């Protein structure tokens, strides 16, 4: 039983070290008890540096499985895609504008 407890602690530590996604649900009801509003939010919990440090200090014997690495890769790729989509929608679907780095030539008043 103790081995099982250790495994679940290590799994929890890994989850905290890699970061995870949490869904929260909030429901509002009117005076009669009817559901008025149901809001579901998804929150990304970032990786925790203390948990990462603890895993590394354990001697490296606990490494991420192939499945965990694939999930993390997929999560990061989808996060990147969401960020790119948000950036495109904020700019009206246009790619970011290039900065003009050329200096403008000053024009004198002709009295030189």
Image: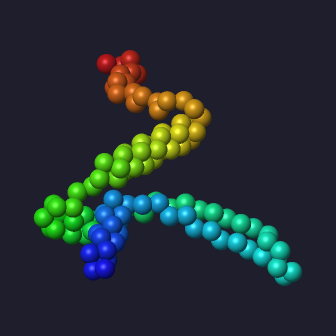
Question: Which residue is found at the position 33% from the left and 59% from the top?
Answer: 18
Residue at the outermost front position: 1
Q: Nearer the viewer, residue 90 or 74?
A: 74
Query: Quarter of the image holding residue 73?
Result: top left
Residue 86: give x, y in percent of width and height: 53, 43
Location of residue 90 with respect to 65 vertically, above or below = above
Location of residue 87 with respect to 10 vertically, above or below = above
Specify whether 68 is left or right of 81: left
Is the N terminus in the top left, top right, bottom left or bottom right quadrant? bottom left
Is residue 48 shown to the viewer in this render?
A: no
Question: Which residue is found at the position 42% from the left and 28% from the top?
Answer: 98
Q: Nearer the viewer, residue 81 or 12?
A: 12
Is the C terminus in the top left, top right, bottom left or bottom right quadrant? top left
Question: Which residue is found at the position 71% from the left and 66% from the top?
Answer: 38
Q: Nearer the viewer, residue 1 or 34?
A: 1
Specify whether 34 is left or right of 50: right
Is residue 90 shown to the viewer in this render?
A: yes
Residue at the outermost left position: 59
Q: How many marks?
A: 0
Residue 31: give x, y in percent of width and height: 84, 82
Residue 10: give x, y in percent of width and height: 29, 69
Question: Which residue is found at the position 23% from the left and 57% from the top?
Answer: 63
């Amino acid at each position: 039983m103790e081995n099982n407890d250790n495994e679940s602690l290590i799994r929890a530590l890994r989850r905290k070290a890699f970061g995870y996604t949490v869904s929260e649900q909030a429901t509002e009801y009117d005076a009669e008890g009817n559901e008025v509003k149901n809001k579901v939010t998804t929150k990304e919990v970032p990786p925790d540096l203390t948990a990462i440090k603890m895993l590394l200090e354990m001697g490296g014997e606990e490494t991420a499985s192939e499945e965990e690495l694939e999930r993390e890769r997929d999560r990061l790729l989808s996060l990147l895609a969401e960020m790119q989509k948000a950036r495109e929608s904020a700019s009206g679907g246009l790619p970011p504008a290039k900065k003009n780095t050329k200096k403008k030539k000053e024009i004198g008043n002709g009295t030189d």
